[in-house]
Amino acid sequence: MLPTSNLVHYLDHVSPEIRDIVLELRNLIASIAPDAAEVRHSKGFSYFHDQRGGTVSAGICQIIIFDDHVHLAFIHGAFLSDPLGLLMGDAKYKKYIRITSYDEAPWDYLKLMITG
């Protein structure tokens, strides 16, 4: 994972609410996949198992940051079980869960989805 100081600097431009969501998602990912590689990109972060491949072939998830919400995205989301029906996006491949509020985020369900 990237050093926290780099992360905080990168999140300077987002609102405190969005920053809290991103940081909590990052904590969830780190607790589930402590060996995950983290790569920063223009709209957020990608997490993958570096030993098994790259961001697509060994992808865990992505955090994509918008001004008023965050997507927890899954490269292979079309293949995930989604009993609550929260996944949105391309029916054949990448899907995401839109998170607009820290307090209303389904944290336990997000943890389940990250676990795969």
Image (cartoon, rainbow, N blue to C red):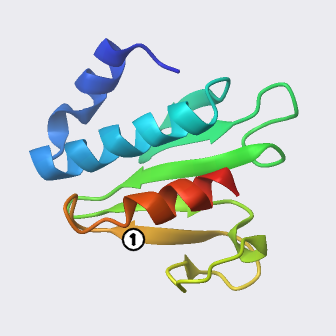
Q: Secondary structure at mark 1?
A: strand
Q: Is 68 situated above or below 14? A: below
Query: Which residue appears at 60% of the width and 53% of the height?
Result: 114
Query: Which residue appears at 42% of the width and 62% of the height?
Result: 71
Name the one closer to the observer, 27 or 67: 27
Name the one closer to the observer, 87 or 42: 87
As drawn, is 93 to the left or to the right of 28? right
Residue 34: image location, x then y, percent: 61, 26
Q: Quadrant of the C terminus?
A: bottom right
Query: Which residue appears at 76% of the width and 49% of the height?
Result: 56
Residue 67: image location, x then y, percent: 21, 59
As drawn, is 83 to the left or to the right of 24? right
As drawn, which residue projects farthest toward the front? 108
Query: Which residue appears at 70% of the width and 86% of the height?
Result: 91
As drawn, which residue projects farthest toward the right? 52
Q: Which residue is denoted by mark 1 in the rendering?
A: 98
Q: Is 38 situated above or below 58? A: above
Q: Amino acid at mark 1?
A: Arg
For disc 1, the neighbor class at 10 Å (few under 14, some 14 to 19, many from 20) is some
Q: Quadrant location of residue 74?
A: bottom right
